[in-house]
Image (cartoon, rainbow, N blue to C red):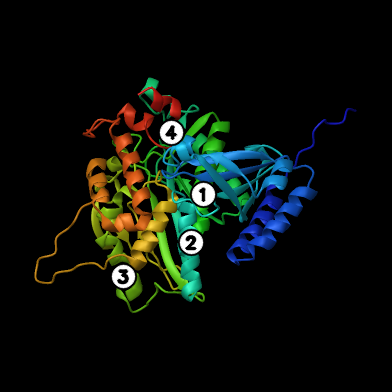
Amino acid sequence: MSTPLREFLEIPYEKLEEMNLAAKADRLARKDPGKLRDARMKYLADEKRIKAVTVCFTDLEGRFHMLDYDKKFLLKSEDNLTFDGSSIRGFSAQAESDLRLAIDWPAFYMLPADVFGPGKVLVFGEVQERDGTPYRGDMRSKLKAFCDELHRRDGTVAHVSNEIEGFLFRGRDAERRYKETGVFEYVSTGGYYHSLPGDTLRQFIDGSAEVQRALGFGNEKDHPEVAPSQFEMNYSYTEAPLAADQVQLYKLVARQVAAKMELTASFLPKPVAGVNGNGMHTNLSLSRRGKNLFWDKKGQDSLSKLGWDFIGRILQSANDVCLILNSSVNSYRRLDPHFEAPNQIKASAIDRGSMVRIPLANEKSARVEVRSIAPDANPYLAIYALLRTGIEGPALEEDDTKRPRTRFLPDNIYDAIRLFKSSKFAAELMGEEVHSKFAELKLASAERCPKALGTRVKRSEIQFHHEVTNQFLWSHF
């Protein structure tokens, strides 16, 4: 009998879940990153069946980038990893292209071999300037720094959970091929909560949920959504930086599982007109020493004054941050209350057309739910903007001498860009240089699309979408 030439690591799903949950617990316990680095590097050195380490980072617009490093090279050079930032849209100019990539060793994942290939592990990276300081365009570092400061100041912890919707379409690369086909083909028309155990949508959801469970997500429920071929897989809340990482992993896993089935998982906000779009409802709460600061049994809708102040600040700055939460041309199709998506700048416990909802909850689960976020938003930037706005933003201005009037979110990206560019608060949130660059990138995408949305989804909304397009397409415009 011949001996296999290669023997790479393949770990059963049950063991993967155990290992990833242990790594997650270390991260949430804020164990010394230096000690975790030493432990992880020792594991990599000792485990001969690991061949490569996937280091990932997110650009300013929210695209997820991955670099595979040979394990032996990484063990020797992990303190001096560099890449060409000028090749990443929204990052360095060509004259200042070299950037560093530091490894965030607490954000370490063992990977299922049948989805990612055998012998690989994944770790999140932090983009740095040449001198090792955080890169100004790396929103992950910005979110982490803000949350670390909250915790250092008085022990406050920001918790987040995201409800991410997507569509499942027939064929690989359905979004890239939309330029030729002009159509997306559903795999199911069952609708909300309805799918047969063996149908394609259910198989996809089951497969994706298994991978999420193995990665330590803490699965709760999964189901088909309202629109045909639409899905949502829910998992438990966690601390904000980890929650943002999970958004990127959620979409990566869905796309990879779909591709293995010769399908496409799409997170375009409104790929098909006339049906519900994709949202990323974001639930936020603050705690201190284990106490949920948003809970007050006697408060309005059982929400504390702090919780209502948090909502008020988000509503006050809703137009300033709208472009951050809805950063593509296509996302403005979704903001339509006829399809359970919000366009009104108000809060309600029952009205799903409101930007902010107060879910029915108890002392443990009291939270605020921001419903206006599209799933193609940069999750680090979106969560950072919401947290900082809710905690430090301008208080809601109310005039008791005037009749209350309903304010509305922009219905197109051009108005959102104009409001964002004129906002001093948005510039303060992101820093003036990054604020200006983000607006420039969004305008470049918008100008490749028809100015009026109309009733039909245009090819350019798909073709020049930041999660779908590539440099080749851009260079041919």
The reply, left or right, for residue 376 in relation to residue 247 is: left
Q: Please name which of the two marks, 1 or 2, marks the residue nearer to the observer.
A: 1
Element on which disc 1 rests: loop
Q: Earlier in the sequence, mark 2 or mark 4?
A: 2
Q: Earlier in the sequence, mark 3 or mark 2?
A: 2
Say if 120 sits above or below 106 in the image: above
The reply to whether discs 2 and 4 touch (Cβ–Cβ < 8 Å) is no
Name the outermost residue toward the bottom.
Answer: 298
According to the picture, the residue beneath numbered tag 3 turns out to be 308
Q: Which mark is residue 129?
A: 1
Mark 2 closeness class: few <14, some 14–19, many ≥20 residues within 10 Å: some
Image coordinates of residue 197 in percent, x first then y, are 54, 41
Q: Amino acid at mark 1?
A: Glu
Residue 181, quarter of the rendered image: top left
Mark 1 closeness class: few <14, some 14–19, many ≥20 residues within 10 Å: some
Real-space Cα separation, disc 2 to disc 4, in angstroms: 29 Å
Q: Amino acid at mark 3?
A: Trp
Say if 403 sits above or below 468 in the image: below
Q: Earlier in the sequence, mark 1 or mark 3?
A: 1
Residue, x 55% and y 42% (percent of image)?
A: 253
Name the outermost residue toward the right.
Answer: 1
Q: Amino acid at mark 4?
A: Val
Mark 4 closeness class: few <14, some 14–19, many ≥20 residues within 10 Å: some
The reply to whether discs 3 and 4 touch (Cβ–Cβ < 8 Å) is no
Q: Tell me, yes or no, if residue 325 can be seen here.
A: no
Q: Which mark is residue 145?
A: 2
